[in-house]
Amino acid sequence: MAEATKITLRRPDDWHLHLRDDLILEAVVAFTARRFARAIVMPNLSPPITTEAQARAYRGRILAALPVGADFTPLMTCYLTDDAEPDEIIRGFKEGVFTAVKLYPAGATTNSANGVTDMGAVLGVLEGMEKAGIPLLVHGETTDPRVDIFHREAVFIDRTLAPLIERFSGLKVVFEHITTSDAVDFVTSAGPNVAATITAHHLMINRNAMFEGGLQPHMYCLPVAKREHHRLALRVAATSGNAKFFLGTDSAPHTLATKETACGCAGIFSAPAALEQYVQVFDEDGALETFEAFASLNGPAFYGLAPNEATITLKKIAGQVPGDIPIENAEGPKGAIKPFMAGEALSWTLVD
Ligand code: DOR
Ligand code: ZN
């Protein structure tokens, strides 16, 4: 068969995205809106989005930051806290403001200090969500400091996620940005109400990338990239066509000032080229025929939404990831944001 040089698919969605607010929001949102029709927008602002009113206001700011003519719908999420009110969440969902609820174990990652300290505190909320059909999006890492950072996802499955799914067997759960073969196996063998997102960067790098030639802060995210065999398991899952796995970039912008410092933030900003990078991965693995399922069909099916009608086309034309994205009025050159693999070659280009 001739090698594919072009792929047309229904417009994809990004099922896990950080847009931030204000100047950063204005600088980054166009990259996503150019490629994706919808995105699940993470609520870990400071303070976090915990009410319907906050989510409505944030959605308004995102829409206001879009370029003229953009066709993009932000899908809002609620940040789960120990004292969350089931009524607030269920009302927000029924009114079409919240699409899902995000569980951050307190202290697991960036802006997670207000997250859940004890799953026992949110059982009532989870029960209400299960009944109402509201998806729970899970940052799946244990926060137990005695657990090795490379094992925190696997330990979270045993200690928290498996018991949670056992108890709430009808709850829709998305295991976000999975990084291990343990997570792939867990999701694969769970019921149809359990799915997972996979980032482009976790398909492309293993943990060596953080230390190659010196400490590489722009390769640091949470969950951290794992060993090579885990990366390969993620590639098999993503390209399998299995409806449980779908695209979620976890694009997470931080300025150079907050990444290139003694205590740098976790987060990889992949929005400028994540779609092209995913296509490259599928092409490398001879799996372009399952790309539309992963990028454009499996996510909407899980969320109970229609897939997008419009299409996009990518061609196998050499391109390049942009360099640092300047942020106007921020702290000089250190206010810029470095994309994942900035300046590096891309083998696929978005043409339409
Ligand atoms: O690397 C990450 N960055 N992981 C997360 O879970 C949060 C995110 C962020 O908000 O920067
Ligand atoms: Zn995230």
Image (cartoon, rainbow, N blue to C red):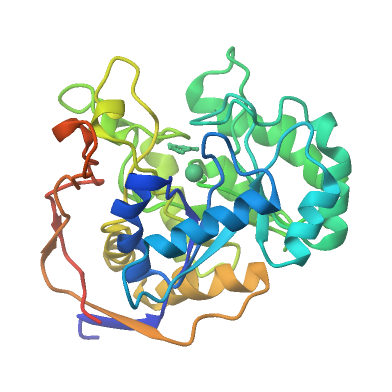
129 up-or-down from 217: above or below: below
- Quarter-of-image position of residue 7: bottom left
Q: How many marks?
A: 0
Q: Position of residue 139 (x, y in %)?
A: 59, 40
Q: What is the quadrant of the C terminus in the image?
A: bottom left
Residue at (29% x, 28% y) in the render: 259
Q: Is residue 97 left or right of residue 277?
A: right
- Quarter-of-image position of residue 300: bottom right
Q: Position of residue 5 (x, y in %)?
A: 19, 80
Q: Position of residue 305 (x, y in %)?
A: 63, 75
Residue at (20% x, 85% y) in the render: 2
Q: Is residue 59 left or right of residue 87?
A: left
11 up-or-down from 248: above or below: below
Q: Nearer the viewer, residue 200 or 133?
A: 133
Residue at (43% x, 76% y) in the render: 292
Q: Residue furthest top?
A: 146
Q: Position of residue 212 (x, y in %)?
A: 20, 28
* Residue 60 can be seen, yes or no: yes
Q: What is the quadrant of the N terminus in the image?
A: bottom left
* Residue 247 can be seen, yes or no: no
Residue at (14% x, 48% y) in the render: 323
